[in-house]
C-alpha cells in the first residue's frame, strides 16, 4: 500500500503561539497551576472524552467525519475506529472493527444480540449526566451479519425508564459488511467488519438536528465472539469507565466543529517551541503500520505491539476498507509549554509539520488530517498501537494534498490548535496531541 508521510524528524516540529496580556490577568494567574507532573492519583482517572461531530448541509462527506478509537489488536481483543457526523436528517456513526474471528446468530433474538459480534450505542439527549437511564436516554444494539443478510432481526432499540431499559420502537437503520478470506461462523481468520448506524433525528422526537454546541451523552460497547461456543470475552468500552446504567460515566457528543474564542487581550509577543530550540525537548512517536504497512509482522500477535522509537519519518493513514488496517497509522507528539511566560492569554497557536512525500502522486488522494488532544503521558520507547492513549477530543483538521519530494525540510502543513494550547497552558501541563485521519480512498495517506 502506498503511503503519505509527514516528516517525523522532530527538529522540524513547530508550535507557534501568539500570547498577550489580559484584563483578567490576576484571575489567570490564580488559575494557572504548577507545571509539575500530575500526581499518581490524578492520572488514575481517565479524562472526560468528547467527540465534536461536524455538520454537513446535504450528503455527509466520509473523509471529513470526526474520528476516535478504542480497543486493542490481538488474537482475541478487538479494536474500532469510530467516525461520527450529522446532517439535517440524521446522526451517523460508523465503526470499522479489526476482528479476527467473525460470528453471528443464524436465528437472532433481541435479547441475545450482544452475545455475538455486535455493537451497543448509547445516547443521552440531556448530556452525560444522571445516575440512571431516563426517558432522554436510548440504547441501540446491532449485531454483525454478512452484507447479504437482511438487517431487521439484527438490531434493537431500548429507552430508559428511570431504573433500566425498556424495548421501544425507533426508526433507525444499520448496515453491516465484513472483509476477509475466512468468512463468518468459521474457525478461520478475517480482517474485520464495519457497522454503520443511521439515527434519524425525527425518530428521537426532534424536528431537526440539535443546535450547534449542543452536547449529548455518548457511549459504545464493542461485543466480541470468537467461537461457536461463545467463550466469554469482555466487551471493549468507550469511554473506559463506562457504566451503561449511569449516563454520568459516558462520554460527550458535541454537535458542530470545535471553536475557541480567546478573552480580550492585547498581543505582545510570540513563542516558537521546536525540538532543541532554546533547550526544548519535543517528543514524538508513531504507532500502527508505520511506513511499510507492518511488513514482516504477524498482524494479530505482533502488529499491535510494534514500537517505532528512533524512526526518522512517520505516516498518517486510514481508509474506508477495513481489510487494509495493517497500513493504518497514527502519530503522537508532546510539546512542553514552560517557555510560555506565566499570566498570559493564548491568542493563537499553530502546529506546523513538514511533508516530504506520500502515496504515488499519480494515484494519491488528498488527506484530511485530524488533530486530537491526549490526556495521558506516554513513553516513546514503549509506545504501541495497543497502549497509546485514547483521544480526549478532536480539536482541528486540515486538508493535505499529495506531493512529490519538494526538497528539505519539506512543505509546511499547519493546523490551528489555539484552544488545545490555551487549555493545556491554563492547566500547567504539556500539550499532548495525536494525528489521525478518516480518509476513504485506497491511496490516501
Image: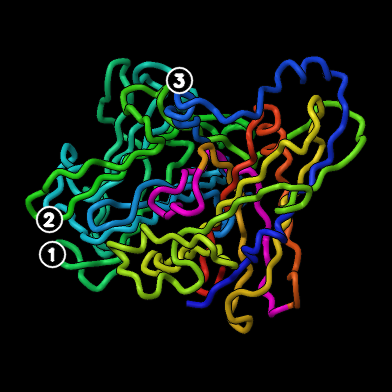
Specify few, some or many for label 2: CA neighbours under 10 Å numbering under 14, 14-19, or 20 or more: some
Q: Nearer the viewer, residue 191 or 269?
A: 269
Q: Secondary structure at mark 2?
A: loop
Q: Nearer the viewer, residue 2 or 271?
A: 271
Residue indicated by mark 2: 227
**Image-based side of 170 in relation to 283, left or right:** left
Which numbered disc, 3 or 2, marks the residue closer to the eye? 2
Note whether residue 60 is visible.
no
Tag 2 or tag 3, which sits nearer the N-term? Answer: 3
Q: CA distance from mark 2 to mark 1?
A: 7 Å
Q: Position of residue 111 (x, y in %)?
A: 17, 37
Tell me, yes or no, whether the two marked residues, 1 and 3, touch with CB atoms within 8 Å: no
Q: Position of residue 219 (x, y in %)?
A: 40, 35
- Figure check: 134 above or below 252: above
Tag 3 or tag 1, which sits nearer the N-term? Answer: 3
Q: Nearer the viewer, residue 423 or 334?
A: 334
As for residue 387 lying within the magenta part, the answer is yes
The quarter of the displayed image where residue 188 is located: bottom left
Q: Position of residue 119 (x, y in %)?
A: 31, 45
Q: Residue at x 69, y 76 (%)?
A: 403
Residue indicated by mark 1: 187
Q: Residue at x 40, y 25 (%)?
A: 249
Tell me, yes or no, whether the two marked residues, 3 and 2, touch with CB atoms within 8 Å: no
Residue indicated by mark 3: 129
Q: Which residues are magenta?
A: 378-405
Amino acid at each position: 500500500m502506498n503511503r503519505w508521510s509527514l516528516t517525523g524528524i522532530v527538529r522540524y516540529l513547530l508550535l507557534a503561539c501568539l500570547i498577550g496580556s489580559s484584563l483578567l490577568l490576576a484571575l489567570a494567574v490564580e488559575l494557572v497551576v504548577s507545571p509539575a507532573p500530575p500526581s499518581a492519583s490524578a492520572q488514575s482517572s481517565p479524562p472526560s472524552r468528547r467527540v465534536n461531530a461536524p455538520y454537513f448541509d446535504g450528503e455527509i462527506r466520509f473523509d471529513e467525519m470526526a474520528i476516535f478509537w478504542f480497543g486493542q489488536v490481538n488474537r482475541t481483543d478487538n479494536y474500532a475506529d469510530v467516525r461520527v457526523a450529522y446532517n439535517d436528517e440524521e446522526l451517523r456513526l460508523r465503526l470499522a472493527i479489526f476482528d479476527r474471528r467473525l460470528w453471528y446468530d443464524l436465528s437472532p433474538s433481541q435479547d441475545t444480540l450482544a452475545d455475538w459480534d455486535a455493537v451497543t450505542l448509547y445516547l443521552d439527549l440531556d448530556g452525560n449526566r444522571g445516575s440512571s437511564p431516563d426517558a432522554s436516554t436510548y440504547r441501540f444494539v446491532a449485531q454483525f451479519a454478512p452484507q447479504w443478510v437482511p438487517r431487521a432481526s439484527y438490531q434493537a432499540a431500548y429507552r430508559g425508564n428511570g431504573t433500566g431499559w425498556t424495548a421501544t420502537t425507533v426508526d433507525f437503520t444499520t448496515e453491516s459488511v465484513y472483509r476477509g478470506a475466512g468468512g463468518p461462523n468459521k474457525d478461520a481468520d478475517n480482517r474485520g467488519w464495519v457497522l454503520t448506524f443511521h439515527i434519524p433525528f425525527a425518530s428521537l422526537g426532534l424536528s431537526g438536528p440539535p443546535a450547534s454546541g449542543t452536547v449529548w451523552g455518548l457511549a459504545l460497547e464493542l461485543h466480541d465472539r470468537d467461537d461457536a461456543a461463545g467463550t466469554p470475552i469482555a466487551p471493549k468500552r468507550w469511554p473506559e469507565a463506562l457504566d451503561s446504567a449511569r449516563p454520568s460515566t459516558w462520554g460527550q457528543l458535541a454537535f458542530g466543529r470545535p471553536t475557541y474564542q480567546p478573552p480580550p487581550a492585547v498581543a505582545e509577543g510570540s513563542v516558537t517551541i521546536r525540538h532543541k530550540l532554546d533547550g526544548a525537548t519535543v517528543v514524538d512517536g508513531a504507532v500502527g503500520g508505520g511506513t511499510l504497512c507492518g511488513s514482516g509482522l504477524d498482524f494479530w500477535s505482533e502488529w499491535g505491539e510494534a514500537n517505532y522509537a528512533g524512526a526518522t519519518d512517520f505516516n498518517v493513514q486510514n481508509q474506508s476498507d477495513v481489510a487494509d488496517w495493517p497500513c493504518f497509522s497514527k502519530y503522537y507528539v508532546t510539546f512542553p509549554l514552560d517557555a510560555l511566560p506565566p499570566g498570559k492569554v493564548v491568542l493563537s497557536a499553530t502546529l506546523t509539520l513538514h511533508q516530504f512525500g506520500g502515496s504515488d502522486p499519480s494515484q494519491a488522494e488528498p488527506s484530511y488530517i485530524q488533530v486530537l488532544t491526549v490526556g495521558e503521558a506516554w513513553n516513546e520507547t514503549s509506545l504501541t498501537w495497543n497502549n497509546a492513549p485514547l483521544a480526549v477530543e478532536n480539536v482541528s483538521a486540515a486538508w493535505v494534498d499529495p506531493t512529490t519530494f519538494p526538497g528539505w525540510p519539506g512543505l509546511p502543513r499547519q493546523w490551528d490548535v489555539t484552544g488545545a494550547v490555551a487549555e493545556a497552558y491554563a492547566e500547567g501541563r504539556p500539550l499532548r496531541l495525536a494525528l489521525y485521519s478518516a480518509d476513504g480512498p485506497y491511496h490516501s495517506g
